[in-house]
Image (spheres, rainbow, N blue to C red):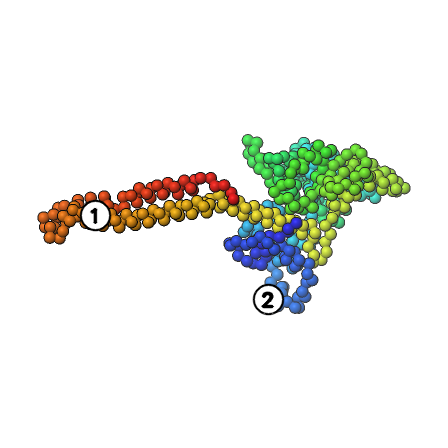
Amino acid sequence: MRRKTAFIESLFLHKPTSGYVCPNCIIGNALRQVTRPQVSADRLPRSARRTVSTTPSVTAVNVQKDIPSAFRGLYDALGAFQRQAAVYANLSQIQLAVRGLESENGITRIAVLGGPNGHQTRRLVKVLLTDPLTPEPEWEKRLADLDDTDGRALLLRYAESLDLDERHPLVRTLSIPSSLLQNHKLEILIQAASEQSEENDGGTQAFLVPGLDSPTSATGSFQTITYPVHKALVLAQGLNSLKALLPPRPGNDEGAGVEMIMAVVNTSWSTLSSASEPLQRIKVINLDRAEEAIATFRQSLNNSFNYEHAWYDSGLPKVSTWLIEGTEALPGILKPTIKRLIETLAVSIEQAIEREEAEAMQKQAASVVPQATRDKMTKYLANWAEAAHIELRDELDRAFNSKQWRKLAWWKLVWRVDDVTSITSETLQRSWLVDADRGILYLAGRIEEAARTPQTPA
């Protein structure tokens, strides 16, 4: 899969963006640079070193963010792209990538999308976040008993104490003391997934940039607010539900972010037979079996063997591994989830540029007259010009030798002074390119006909 686009390269290398840049070879250089070892401050030029006097005050109005030096180049490139050329990508996704570069261990946001009934989606999230070594905490009960009647999305964040914030009109925030959220710097967005169809097929963007419907007036109209994520987990209740949630055909952005999406199908039968399934991004799980395994282990540590068998039988281990995959943070190295998001942006941008170029070339091809027609029009024009020159030469020669024109001989002007205007006008009207005037009208009609005739692509 190609993961490069020239627009981000032009920004990263501080090239002007006003002219055309071929969409090739870009993001890899910036991504590779963030993995290189850091240069010691003693080896930097004096102008590049930060001193105490140049550090912005905490009371300054425009405080510069303390971006890690390893990410500064990529941060500036994405920031410049966000300001100048965001038309080629989703602006909220660019902003999410920019915020991820503001620290070495940025938060990874994961969307868990399910059907209209959020109960099953919350069951899946609860099972994935549960620590079976501890008694059932209060947040698990609170998460299971939440009311979904208002249709708002639910955002899970880590906090030392349980708290539910419902002030936001679009998203409720539940802060829970989950060790998984804390250790891997995760945020989980729980929302109902939009059904995909031939008319409404957003490809991977429908999952990586879910929309939150915001009422804009008392008339009932809604405005969609995008809420981008780094990864998306789609839950379906059976194959029919999976068919409604997933797009029936690949979207325009096929290949951009596919590895960041996983689909799971909840069933009531054992998943061990599907362990070698060929579809890497569609997993079969059994939530009843997983909850049974956790409850068994919490009853007694002696049930560890039964827990392990039931847990693997539920199919959740692969989903749990995928959930935290790429969330590890190492000093000076870009977090894998953020890197994949930027690569996905690069692919989406390149595809958008290619689509725009294809449309422009198609319009240009439709507006260009075929060579055969142009050659025919050129021949018509050459013939008309030749005939016009011959007519002008012969007719003027005939007019100036006519009896009417000889009436204006110089020695007769004293008696013909009143006839000069009429004789000159009559001579020009009868002899000045009469046939050429009619011929140019015919030629103009042929040119207009050629321009209006639909052209058949070669």
**Crowding at label 2, few (<14), some or many (≥20) Cα neighbours within 10 Å?**
few
The quadrant in which residue 152 appears is: top right
User: In the image, 440: left or right of 180?
Assistant: left
Residue 72 or 181: which is nearer the viewer?
Answer: 72
**What residue sits right under mark 1 in the picture?**
399
Q: Residue at x 76, y 38 (%)?
A: 284
Check the image and report above or below for 174 versus 1: above
What amino acid is labelled 2 in the image? Answer: Ser
What amino acid is labelled 1 in the image? Answer: Ala
Residue 410, x across and y down, in percent: 13, 53
Q: Secondary structure at mark 1?
A: helix
**What residue sits right under mark 2 in the picture?**
47
Residue 76, x across and y down, in percent: 59, 56
Q: Residue at x 16, y 46 (%)?
A: 404
Residue 160 in view: no
User: In the image, 180: left or right of 172?
Assistant: right
Please state which of the two labelled residues, at mark 1 or mark 2, is closer to the viewer: 1
Check the image and report above or below for 128 versus 239: below
Do residues under tags 1 and 2 come within 8 Å of each other at their CB atoms?
no
Check the image and report above or below for 39 versus 197: below
Label located before the other in sequence (1 or 2): 2
Residue 29 or 385: which is nearer the viewer?
Answer: 385
Whole-Å distance between the Cαs marked 1 and 2?
Answer: 86 Å
Residue 129, x across and y down, in percent: 76, 42
Q: Residue at x 54, y 48 (%)?
A: 357
Residue 242, x across and y down, in percent: 70, 35
